[in-house]
């Protein structure tokens, strides 16, 4: 096994889908920790620039690109590493989550949306992870990969089945990579949040949704970001392979 020391701060971190919501909170958490962050965006450049401008410290970079395209993923990883001078941490946060209830969605739309979810949520995560891992191995310094999964991978997503299925696949991917990359000092873990108080899902946060948790609320983005920051830390190596539930006891796995 390769013995490596991941630095506590001053790391080089790529956060995918960091233009707003949880991605913005993740970028801010790492920057506040003393790390340098590559802020990735797909189409929301203006919001991504706002994220970039809100980060503590200096040396952060903005990286646009389509994760749903393999060439786009390669370009994102390359430009992030070039801008930061390497990669120590990858946070796979970018995801598509569009409704497509099985009973009411036309077949052509069903196929299109499934392909889009798979391309971004699963293959985009897979491709970035491969690229980042090879960069970390070449550096010889180890690293961390943290995937943002979902409670929906376990609870089910009746109106968003492709989202739930791809997030379940992301959890499985993370566990496979945890075993494969450990000899190189790279730890891989995932978080499985329930609902988060973000702009993207604000219209879905009804009293009924909040009541799913005995705390009577949903998570803040900062709460999830804090857990990701810990999983990416040097002290969390033994959590590699973990899928960490972050749902306020709204769903308990057995």
Image (cartoon, rainbow, N blue to C red):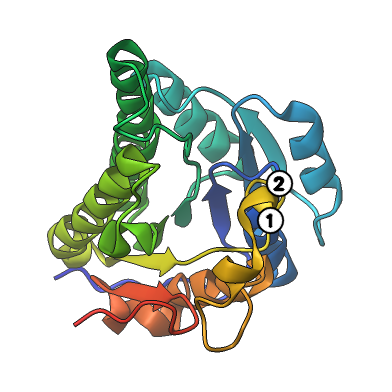
Looking at this view, is 39 or 163 the one in front? 163
Helix, strand, or loop for circle 1?
A: loop
Query: Does 115 sit above or below residue 247?
Result: above
Pointer 2 residue = 20
Query: Does 193 sit above or below residue 69?
Result: below
Q: Residue 173: x and y, percent?
A: 21, 52
Q: Is residue 150 left or right of residue 23?
A: left
Q: Is residue 170 left or right of residue 203?
A: left
Whether residue 105 is visible: yes
Q: Residue 108: x and y, percent?
A: 31, 11
Whether residue 134 is visible: no
Which residue is painted at 31% across and 27% down in the image? Answer: 114
Mark linked to residue 64: none
Neighbour class for label 1 at 10 Å: few (<14), some, many (≥20)? Answer: some
Q: Residue 48: x and y, percent?
A: 74, 38
Quadrant where the image shows the C terminus: bottom left
Which residue is painted at 38% across and 76% down in the image? Answer: 245
Helix, strand, or loop for circle 2?
A: loop
Mark linked to residue 198: 1
Residues at circles 2 and 1 in contact by the CB criterion of under 8 Å = yes
Which residue is painted at 65% across and 24% down in the image? Answer: 43
Viewer-side label of 2, 1: 1
Looking at this view, is 163 or 148 the one in front? 163
């Amino acid at each position: 096994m390769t013995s490596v020391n991941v630095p506590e701060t001053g790391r080089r971190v790529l956060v995918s889908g960091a233009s707003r919501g949880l991605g913005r909170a993740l970028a801010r958490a790492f920057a506040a920790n003393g790390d340098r962050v590559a802020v990735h965006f797909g189409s929301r450049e203006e919001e991504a620039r706002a994220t970039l401008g809100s980060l503590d410290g200096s040396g952060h970079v903005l990286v646009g690109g389509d994760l749903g395209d393999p060439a786009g993923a390669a370009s994102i990883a390359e430009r992030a590493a070039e801008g930061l001078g390497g990669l120590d941490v990858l946070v796979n946060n970018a995801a598509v989550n569009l409704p497509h209830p099985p009973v009411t969605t036309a077949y052509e739309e069903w196929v299109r949306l499934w392909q889009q979810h798979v391309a971004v949520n699963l293959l985009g995560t897979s491709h970035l992870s491969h690229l980042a891992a090879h960069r970390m191995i070449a550096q010889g310094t180890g690293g961390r990969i943290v995937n943002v999964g979902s409670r929906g991978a376990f609870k089910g997503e009746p109106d968003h089945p492709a989202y739930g299925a791809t997030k379940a696949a992301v959890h499985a991917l993370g566990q496979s990579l945890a075993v494969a990359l450990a000899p190189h000092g790279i730890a891989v873990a995932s978080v499985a949040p329930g609902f988060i108080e973000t702009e993207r899902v604000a219209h879905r946060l009804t009293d009924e949704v909040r009541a799913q948790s005995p705390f009577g609320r949903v998570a803040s983005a900062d709460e999830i970001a804090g857990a990701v920051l810990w999983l990416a830390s040097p002290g969390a190596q033994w959590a590699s392979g973990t899928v960490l539930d972050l749902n306020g006891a709204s769903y308990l796995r057995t």
